[in-house]
């Protein structure tokens, strides 16, 4: 089962003593700030956690596997998250 935004707010509320409403405001503003920063074309680096970047995808031709027809895939920009070495170490560390 995925860990949702509501679960994050509940966890923050329990650890900090903030109300769930206040923790929801903090989480939503953090996500909005990340979105606005990426829309501005900037990279976000959070030491010990990772970085959010934009990856440019070039246009290319692909093939529809069902019909064999060639289809053009348009160029675009994808937001990506790259975990830091510290986060990878913590996630892979046996408990």
Image (cartoon, rainbow, N blue to C red):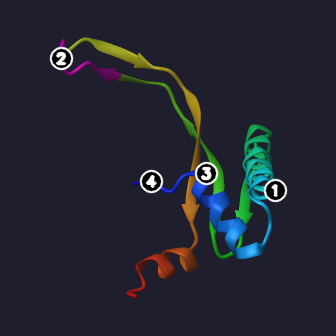
Q: Quick check: can you spot residue 51?
A: no
For disc 2, the marked residue is 66
Residue 62 as seen in the image, left or right of residue 34: left
Residues drawn in magenta: 62-67
The answer for how far apart the CA atoms under marks 4 and 2 are is: 32 Å
Any mark on residue 22, and which? 1
**Quarter of the figure that contains the N terminus:** bottom left
Q: Residue at x 63, y 67 (%)?
A: 11
The answer for how far apart the CA atoms under marks 4 and 3 are is: 10 Å
Q: Residue at x 75, y 37 (%)?
A: 39
The answer for how far apart the CA atoms under marks 2 and 3 are is: 38 Å
Q: Helix or strand or loop: what does disc 3 sit on?
A: helix
Foreground mark, 4 or 2, reads 4
For disc 4, the marked residue is 2
Mark nearer the N terminus (4 vs 2): 4
Q: Residue at x 72, y 63 (%)?
A: 45
Q: Helix or strand or loop: what does disc 2 sit on?
A: loop
Residue 81 appears at what percent x and percent y? 57, 55
Q: Residue at x 81, y 56 (%)?
A: 22
The answer for how far apart the CA atoms under marks 3 and 1 are is: 13 Å
Mark nearer the N terminus (1 vs 2): 1
Mark nearer the N terminus (2 vs 3): 3
């Amino acid at each position: 089962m995925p860990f949702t935004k509501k679960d994050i707010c509940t966890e923050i509320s329990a650890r900090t003593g903030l109300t769930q409403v206040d923790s929801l405001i903090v989480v939503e503003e953090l996500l909005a700030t990340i979105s606005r920063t990426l829309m501005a074309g900037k990279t976000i680096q959070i030491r010990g956690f990772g970085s959010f970047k934009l990856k440019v995808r070039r246009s290319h031709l692909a093939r529809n596997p069902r019909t064999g027809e060639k289809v053009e895939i348009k160029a675009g920009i994808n937001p990506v998250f790259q975990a830091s070495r510290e986060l990878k170490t913590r996630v892979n560390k046996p408990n």
